[in-house]
Amino acid sequence: MIDSVRVRVPAKINLRLSVGPLRADGYHDLVTVFHAVGLYDEISITRVGAGSGVSAQVAGEDASAVPVDDDNIAVRAVREAAHRARQPTDLAITITKCIPVAGGMAGGSADAAAALVGCAALWPGTLRADDLAGIAAALGSDVPFLLDGGTMIGTGRGEILTPVLAQGGFNWVIAVSDNGLSTPGVYAELDRLRAGADVPPPSGDDALLRALRAGDAKALARRLHNDLQSAALSLRPTLARVLDAGIELGALGGIVSGSGPTCAFLARDRDHALDIAVGLTTTGLVRLVRHAAGPVDGARVIA
Ligand code: ATP
């Protein structure tokens, strides 16, 4: 029996995010193409003495913005997994954040996926893949994707997944802004901007899938699309300058990641990405800039 497990989990960007009309239950139907990129949080889960209960601590970038009680989605994931596996919840969780908080890269969902994979490793034979997928979908619509990673189409609220054939890898530049944006706030702004308009159902994009199959970065750059981008720009107009700066520096394409404010730029190759990253850093428009390759695997045990 192992006493401790360490899991690494990537962030996601949406290569396409098509948002349907507001539903009566307050949600939106989506058609999205998730793409896991190599920007990672790490979670360790350690058994502690009987009666200690669950505790969490958070280190790394933006740590102070992340709750350490049951509002932390990784804590909720561990409690759900323990309940399903009929295991004690005497566990200490440590989260080391590198994924920007409230950045539109699904950092919280990533931590939840990592927590589920960690619990499955701590308690072998107690949690099947479909148990994990069920708990993940109940926790949040991005969580199921981060169990697997890669590149996938998400429908429903994003939790119904179909793998996409993608050839080779892509090089991204991730530009992280100073303050986060609230995902519900960005959806509400989209609804406000669309008020009175006849919003079509969400749709996929065959040309985007062809570009992924061909491993063609230029063609992929032309097909990047995010319906939430106008809402994120409306709430944070300075993001337009970030997007313009990335394109002026030679990026093949640029997009707001999910609900923002993080922006993702597609480069020709690794060296090109590093050049764009250096250029963006010197603009002073963003807090930090990272190179990240995609697609990468989802949550995986590393120790
Ligand atoms: P998404 O892209 O899934 O819409 P996001 O990446 O924009 O989400 P998160 O980093 O997941 O945003 O954080 C959203 C909020 O969730 C934060 O403001 C924070 O208070 C809360 N939160 C709860 N648990 C976590 C966690 N483990 N990591 C980060 N934020 C968390």
Image: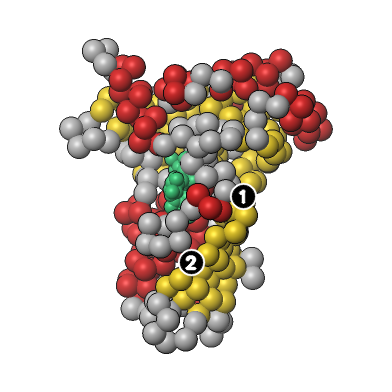
| Residue 294 x %, y % | 64, 41
What residue do we see at 56% from left, 53% from top? 63
| Residue 37 x %, y % | 61, 43
- 205 vs 173: above or below: above
Q: Nearer the viewer, residue 173 or 269?
A: 173
The type of residue carrying mark 1 is Glu
| Residue 271 x %, y % | 81, 32
Instruction: Determine whether, in the image, residue 164 is placed left or right of residue 200.
Output: right
Q: Distance of mark 1 from mark 2, alpha carbons? A: 16 Å
Q: Which mark is residue 56?
A: 2
- 278 vs 127: above or below: above
- 46 vs 101: above or below: below
Q: Which of 220 and 263 is in front in this view?
A: 263
Q: Is residue 114 visible?
A: yes
Instruction: Determine whether, in the image, residue 252 is placed left or right of residue 187.
Output: right
Q: Name the residue under label 1.
A: 61
Q: In which quarter of the image is residue 156?
A: top left
| Residue 161 x %, y % | 41, 44
What residue do we see at 64% from left, 70% from top? 303
Q: Are there few (<14), some (14-19), or many (20+) residues within 10 Å of tag 1?
A: few
Instruction: Determine the residue located farthest toward the left in the rendered image.
Output: 24
Q: Is residue 221 visible?
A: no
Q: In which quarter of the image is residue 87?
A: bottom left
Query: Judging from the image, what secondary structure is the residue with disc 1 in?
Result: loop
Instruction: Determine the residue located farthest toward the front in the rendered image.
Output: 64
Query: Judging from the image, what secondary structure is the residue with disc 2 in?
Result: strand
